[in-house]
Each structure stands twice: as structure tokens, then as C-alpha cells.
Image (cartoon, grey):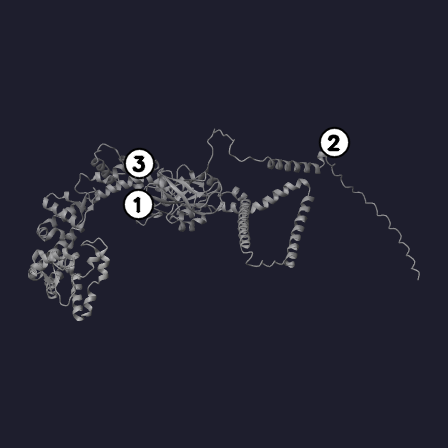
């Protein structure tokens, strides 16, 4: 390997130190198994979005290792001294651009041109403020290489007018200068639509007698007919039914109930109930009146029908027969078919005369030439985009590497990592490891494997519609007061505050200290719950007894008293045996405990405490050793390549507990604090003194120190001489004489 790498140990694994241009230039030589991450998303991280989009060359929303390597190779080739990347400066000196290569020379020339267009010809460095203002860069140029030409790019008025017509019909596309313009594809579509529209009109003009019986007024006549066609067909159908059967005539007309329902309303000619009535009184073979006798809700529509269609085609009539209606619709049937075959609707708003004028002119060739002229400048324009890319990489690339190839920013704690979205303040703690999430339920499935206590929060900014979902890792303190529904404040990286509400928690150990007290807190919590349940049950039973007594008093003369319950002797005996066994066990244990030397009693208590707490502490210690960052980021789309551990010490720096400022003065007198009894302290001190006294007394030290006044003497050593023999047993007694007969 041609480059000497330096590593640092952090998070339980080796991380490469990327500090200078040589490290970036030789990045391809570093084994990717030593990279901390191999992919990261372009959304949901605190980094310049445009830089991430430039790195994401395949536009899949993720940045992968090959894209990082390609960017490293390009940026090192474009700079004379790649060590400039370590500065992270926002401005790029023009002299720093490597102009010994064709691409570098073009980028430097484009950077100088940008500054010239912005009115800064003597400035020797370029910044993002210069490269991102494309509207100003191209404001003074007609052509910018994007293939989109605004109307101002044409020198002659007719071509400018056609470009404006194309924008009006096909829609405009903003060019790099921000002006609306057209592309070659839009121009081609416009002229194709114009030709189709002209040809369609030519067909109508060829057979104008049949298709356009009223010439330009034919469309108005058809519109008037369509407005009433459904209602007219309904009327003549009702008349035919009445002619078919005289009994149907009454049913085809509104009954009295419908008119009675209208009588109590404020009516106008636009009332919906009136418009739903038939056009006129239905009778067999009756013509449809166009004036008197017509449904008032349809008066305006039929007045237009009479003016635009009936009078020009059938003459001035006051009523229409069914035959008249059929003749009217048949006359306009060719026009209707012609309309159905309409082509070039996109340019219809211009009118056939303007369309044919455009087609007859030379604007099509002129526009094609303008687009070609603009496209010829594409290399220069692309070089301007390359300038923006180089300026961004010059500022951001090394920082991204230290949050991708290594997690230096995260573990050094000098700066927040790109995945840290802000700080959550909750329960007198500030959590720095906060990550943006889109789907908390889905995220928790993977993130739960991190072995970290996680709190998912919904964040809302008051007065706006902005919403945000985050997950915060609690790595210090305890979880006694953390629960769903608690509220806090979240500060994002921009310093904006959000109202945060806990919606979900993933419970994991936070510290070994919490695990030590955990069993006792659970035991106390269980007792409190049982006491609460028993109290509630007792209250319910008491209430039931009172209600039962009241009911018994109220119905004493109506129902006999319930029979007395008999005790089950066997059950009572079994309970007695069980209670006796438990009492015997407790008495035996107490006897054994009392028989122990007094100085051993505190040790026994300590041993009992350790027996209870050690399993919980051991489990917590094992989980805390496995606590790592990987699953939290993997659930967000990262590909973390190592076990990025969050040790107990490092976790303490990620979650800060409230502390008084140095030099603060405390007044410990709380006027509202509950009065403390001195007896607990007295009992603890007495027990300690008693244990010490018992230990010293068992050794005879108290007796020695007080010269026999207090305590028992020291135990005498057992003699090793041969023990005395037992005396001989007495002779057997003589048997008693037998009793006299």
C-alpha cells in the first residue's frame, strides 16, 4: 500500500483518521471492511441537500461507497492541492483550481465568467452564493446551453410572437435564467398540433353546407341543443306513453302532493324541485311550447335554444313538435361528428386564422436554429454546474467522509454527527442522540436491537403546520419517570423549538445503578398496585353491603331472610394446616437467624441484597456492553459496517443530567418539604453500632478494653490433653420379691 493510514480507537473499534488531501486521494486503497458505513440516505440527515444530490449520481436516494470514491477521485483531480479540503472553507480561490487538465481549465474559466456576469471581475475567489444564483449568472445572456429559449432570444418580432404562442398553448419551461421558454420538443409538438388543427378545419370547410349549416354560429346552436336535449327527450317520451295508454297521462304529470310540498317554500325559477318537473303539461301528441306553458325553471335555456337554433334552422316557432326536434338534431349531426373528430385542440385557443398564419411563416425553422444555437453552449453551461459542484465538495466533502467512512464527529463530541437532528429536553435531561424517523413502528422493529432505551416523539411547531417525528436515546439516569404521553421540548439543529410528546418507548437498561434498585422498585410498585386493588375491592364490597342492607330494610316484610351459610370444616382445617406450616418455617428461619453471631447479621443482610440485585445488575451490564448505534441508523436506511458501540461512559456524554452551575449557592431549607422523622437514621446508626459491638464482643475485645466491666471474656482455647475417663456404671439393683398370693 502506497499510503500510511492512521487509526483511532473509539466506540470499541478502529476508525480511520481522514485529515488531509492524501487521505482522500488514496481512499480507494482503504479496505472497505474498515469503513464505518457503506451507504446512507440523502434525506433525514443534517447535511447540505444539494451536495448530497450531487453525490447521488444514480438518483436512487442513497449514497453508496462507489459514489464516494468517484467523488474523491474527481475533487482531488480538480484541485492543485487536495489538502485544501481539510480547511472546509466556503469560498474557493480561483488559483486553487487545477487548470493543467482540460476539465480543470474549463472550470476555472467558467468560474471567472460567473464572477464577471455577477459584476465581480476582480474577485479572486468564488462561493456558493455566487454559483447558486443562476438567475443572475444568466440574466444578461440570451443563450445558456440548457436547450430552452425564451421569447427574448429571438431578434425578430414574428418569431418572438410565435414563441409566446407556444408558451401559451403548450406551457413554458424555466431556463437557467429563470425565464419561461420552450424546448425543441415543445416546439415540435406545437407545430404538429397546429397542422392537425388546420387539416381538421379544412375538412369542415370542404363540406361546409352539411357540417357548418350556420357557419361560425353552428357551435352556439349545438351548445343550445345539448343544454336541453335530455329534458326534451324526457318530455316527448312521456307524451308517447300518454298516447299509448290514457291511464298513463295522469301518472306522467306531477300529482297534487308535489305541488303541495312546494307551496310552503320560497320559490324561484332556479329551485331544484321546479327544474325536476316535466317541461310542460304532458298530453298525447302535444307539441313542446317554447314560451307560454313552459316550465319556468327552463325558460332561459329555451329562449337561447329558440334564438340560436330553432329560428335559424326551422323558422320562428312558438312550439316544437317531436318531428321538429328530430329534424333539428339531424341537421346538426354532421357537425357533431366533425367535432368528435377534432384534432389539434391544444392550439384551438389561437383560432384557425392565427394557426394558419404561423404555419405559413418561417418561424419553425427560426426556432429550431435558436434551440441549436443555445445547445451549442451546453459545455460551457455544464462547466458552470461543475463550478458549483467543486465549490460544494471543497467545503463539505471531508466532513461527509468523517461521518461516513469514520464516525469521528460523533465519537469526538466536538461537533454533532450528520444523523443527529437536534436535542430533546425531557425529565431534567438533554438527549443529544436524536434521529429523524418517518415510521416509528417500522423503525422500532430494527432499532430495538440496539439495546438502548429509546423514546419516540411527535414534534409540532405551534402556529405552523410543521410536524416531525424523532427517536431519542436515553443513555444516562433512569426510566422511572419516562412514559408515553410525557411532554418535552425539542431543539433542532437550526435552534428552532418544537413541542415534543412521547408516543412510544423501547425499554432497555439505562445504567447498572438503575438495575441495582430495579427489583426493589418493582416490588414496591407491585405492593402499591395490590394495595390499590384491595382498597378498591374493599370499597366496592363496603358499598355493596350498604346497598344490600338498605335493600333488606326496604324489603324486610316482603322476603324471608337468606339462610345462614354453613362453614366447611375441611376447608378450615386445611387452612389451619397451611398457616401452621408457614409459621413453622418462619419460626425456624428466625431461630437460625437469631442463633448466628451478632456481627454476622449485617453481612447476611448485605448478602441478601446482593442476591436480589446481582442478577438484574448482571443482565443490565451484559446489555449495556452490547449497546450500539448500528440498528438505530440501519432502521433509517444506513448501512453501518461495524458494531458502533455506545459504552456507559460515552453514553453518559450523550445524555446530560441537570446539574447546578459551578459556584451556585443552595438553600436547603424547603418550607413545604414534609417533616422527616429522625427514627430511620437513629435505627440505622443503632444497627451499625450494635453490629460493631457484637463483633468486638465476640472476640472479647470489649471485655479486655473495659477490664472486665462490660462484655464477655475472650473464648478460652480448648485443651489438647487426654479427656478424663467416664466413671464406672453403678451395679444393677436386686430384683423385687414377687407379690404374696
Quarter in which the N terminus is drawn: top left
Residue bearing the label numbered 3: 90
Q: CA distance from mark 3 to mark 2?
A: 87 Å
Q: Residue 32 or 560: which is nearer the viewer?
A: 560
How many neighbours does mark 2 have within 10 angstroms: few (below 14), some (14-19), or many (20 or more)?
Answer: few
- Position of 307 compared to 91: left or right? left
Helix or strand or loop: what does disc 1 sit on?
helix
- Position of 205 compared to 547: left or right? left
Disc with the residue nearer the chain's start (2 vs 1): 1
Disc with the residue nearer the chain's start (3 vs 1): 1
Q: Residue 489 or 303: which is nearer the viewer?
A: 303
Residue plotted at (20% across, 57% down): 274
Count of labels in the image:
3
Helix or strand or loop: what does disc 3 sit on?
loop
Are discs 3 and 2 less than 8 Å apart at CB? no
Quarter in which the C terminus is drawn: bottom right
- From this viewpoint, which residue is outermost toward the right? 740
Quadrant location of residue 284? Answer: bottom left
Q: Nearer the viewer, mark 2 or mark 1?
A: 2
Q: Residue 223 or 32: which is nearer the viewer?
A: 223
How many neighbours does mark 3 have within 10 angstroms: few (below 14), some (14-19), or many (20 or more)?
Answer: some
Picture coordinates of residue 640, whole percent (x, y): 40, 47
Residue bearing the label numbered 1: 53
Are discs 3 and 1 less than 8 Å apart at CB? no
Picture coordinates of residue 424, whole percent (x, y): 41, 40
Residue bearing the label numbered 2: 707
Picture coordinates of residue 407, whole percent (x, y): 40, 42
Q: CA distance from mark 3 to mark 1?
A: 18 Å
Picture coordinates of residue 240, whole percent (x, y): 16, 68
Q: CA distance from mark 2 to mark 1?
A: 91 Å
Amino acid at each position: 500500500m502506497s499510503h500510511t493510514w492512521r487509526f483511532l480507537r473509539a466506540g470499541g473499534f478502529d476508525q480511520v483518521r481522514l485529515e488531509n488531501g492524501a487521505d482522500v486521494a488514496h481512499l480507494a486503497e482503504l479496505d472497505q471492511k474498515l469503513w464505518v458505513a457503506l451507504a446512507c440516505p440523502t434525506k433525514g440527515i443534517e447535511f447540505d441537500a444539494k451536495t448530497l444530490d450531487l453525490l447521488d449520481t444514480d438518483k436512487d436516494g442513497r449514497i453508496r461507497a462507489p459514489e464516494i470514491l468517484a467523488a474523491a477521485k474527481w475533487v482531488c483531480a480538480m484541485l492543485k492541492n487536495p489538502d485544501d479540503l481539510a480547511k472546509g472553507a466556503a469560498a474557493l480561490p480561483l488559483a486553487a483550481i487545477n487548470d493543467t487538465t482540460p476539465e480543470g481549465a474549463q472550470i476555472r474559466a467558467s468560474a471567472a465568467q460567473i464572477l464577471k456576469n455577477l459584476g465581480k471581475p476582480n474577485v479572486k475567489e468564488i462561493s456558493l452564493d455566487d454559483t447558486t444564483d443562476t438567475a443572475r449568472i444568466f440574466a444578461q445572456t440570451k443563450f445558456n446551453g440548457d436547450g430552452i429559449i425564451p421569447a427574448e432570444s429571438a431578434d425578430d418580432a414574428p418569431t418572438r410572437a410565435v414563441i409566446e404562442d407556444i408558451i401559451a398553448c403548450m406551457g413554458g419551461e424555466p431556463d437557467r435564467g429563470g425565464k419561461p421558454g420552450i424546448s425543441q420538443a415543445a416546439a415540435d409538438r406545437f407545430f404538429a398540433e397546429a397542422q392537425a388543427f388546420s387539416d381538421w378545419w379544412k375538412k369542415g370547410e370542404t363540406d361546409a353546407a352539411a357540417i357548418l349549416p350556420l357557419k361560425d354560429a353552428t357551435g352556439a346552436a349545438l351548445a343550445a341543443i345539448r343544454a336541453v336535449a335530455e329534458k326534451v327527450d324526457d318530455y316527448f317520451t312521456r307524451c308517447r306513453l300518454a298516447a299509448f295508454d290514457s291511464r298513463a297521462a295522469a301518472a306522467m304529470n306531477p300529482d297534487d302532493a308535489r305541488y303541495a310540498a312546494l307551496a310552503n317554500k320560497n320559490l324561484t325559477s332556479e329551485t331544484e324541485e321546479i327544474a325536476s318537473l316535466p317541461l310542460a303539461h304532458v298530453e298525447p301528441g302535444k307539441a313542446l311550447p317554447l314560451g307560454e306553458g313552459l316550465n319556468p325553471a327552463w325558460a332561459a335555456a329555451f329562449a337561447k335554444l329558440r334564438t340560436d337554433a330553432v329560428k335559424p334552422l326551422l323558422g320562428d316557432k312558438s312550439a316544437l313538435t317531436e318531428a321538429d326536434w328530430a329534424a333539428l338534431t339531424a341537421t346538426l349531426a354532421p357537425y357533431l361528428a366533425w367535432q368528435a373528430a377534432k384534432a389539434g385542440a391544444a392550439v384551438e385557443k389561437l383560432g384557425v386564422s392565427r394557426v394558419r398564419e404561423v404555419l405559413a411563416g418561417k418561424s419553425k425553422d427560426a426556432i429550431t436554429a435558436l434551440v441549436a444555437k443555445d445547445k451549442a453552449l451546453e459545455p460551457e453551461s455544464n462547466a458552470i454546474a461543475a463550478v458549483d459542484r467543486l465549490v460544494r465538495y471543497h467545503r463539505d466533502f471531508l466532513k461527509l467522509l468523517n461521518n461516513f467512512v469514520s464516525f469521528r464527529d460523533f465519537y469526538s463530541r466536538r461537533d454533532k454527527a450528520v444523523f443527529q437532528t437536534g436535542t430533546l429536553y425531557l425529565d431534567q435531561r438533554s438527549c443529544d442522540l436524536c434521529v429523524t424517523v418517518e415510521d416509528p413502528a417500522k423503525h422500532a422493529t430494527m432499532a430495538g436491537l440496539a439495546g438502548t432505551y429509546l423514546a419516540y416523539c411527535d414534534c409540532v411547531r405551534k402556529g405552523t403546520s410543521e410536524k416531525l417525528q424523532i427517536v431519542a436515546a436515553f443513555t444516562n439516569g433512569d426510566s422511572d419517570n419516562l412514559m408515553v404521553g410525557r411532554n418535552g421540548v425539542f431543539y433542532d439543529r437550526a435552534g428552532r423549538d418544537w413541542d415534543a410528546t412521547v408516543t412510544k418507548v423501547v425499554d432497555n437498561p439505562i445504567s447498572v445503578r438503575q438495575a441495582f434498585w430495579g427489583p426493589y422498585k418493582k416490588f414496591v410498585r407491585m405492593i402499591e398496585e395490590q394495595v390499590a386493588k384491595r382498597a378498591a375491592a374493599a370499597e366496592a364490597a363496603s358499598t355493596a353491603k350498604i346497598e344490600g342492607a338498605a335493600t333488606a330494610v326496604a324489603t324486610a316484610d316482603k322476603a324471608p331472610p337468606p339462610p345462614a351459610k354453613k362453614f366447611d370444616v375441611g376447608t378450615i382445617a386445611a387452612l389451619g394446616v397451611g398457616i401452621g406450616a408457614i409459621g413453622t418455617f418462619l419460626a425456624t428461619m428466625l431461630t437460625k437467624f437469631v442463633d448466628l453471631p451478632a456481627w454476622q447479621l449485617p453481612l447476611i443482610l448485605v448478602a441478601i441484597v446482593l442476591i436480589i440485585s446481582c442478577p438484574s445488575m448482571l443482565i443490565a451490564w451484559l446489555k449495556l456492553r452490547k449497546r450500539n448505534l448500528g440498528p438505530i441508523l440501519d432502521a433509517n436506511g444506513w448501512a453501518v459496517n461495524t458494531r458502533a458501540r455506545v459504552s456507559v461512559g460515552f453514553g453518559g456524554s450523550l445524555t446530560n443530567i441537570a446539574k447546578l452551575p459551578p459556584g451556585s449557592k443552595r438553600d436547603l431549607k424547603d418550607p413545604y418539604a414534609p417533616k422527616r422523622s429522625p427514627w430511620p437514621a437513629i435505627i440505622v446508626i443503632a444497627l451499625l453500632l450494635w453490629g460493631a459491638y457484637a463483633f468486638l464482643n465476640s472476640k472479647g475485645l470489649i471485655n479486655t478494653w473495659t477490664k472486665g466491666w462490660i462484655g464477655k471474656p475472650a473464648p478460652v482455647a480448648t485443651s489438647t490433653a487426654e479427656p478424663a475417663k467416664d466413671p464406672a456404671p453403678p451395679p444393677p439393683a436386686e430384683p423385687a420379691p414377687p407379690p404374696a398370693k
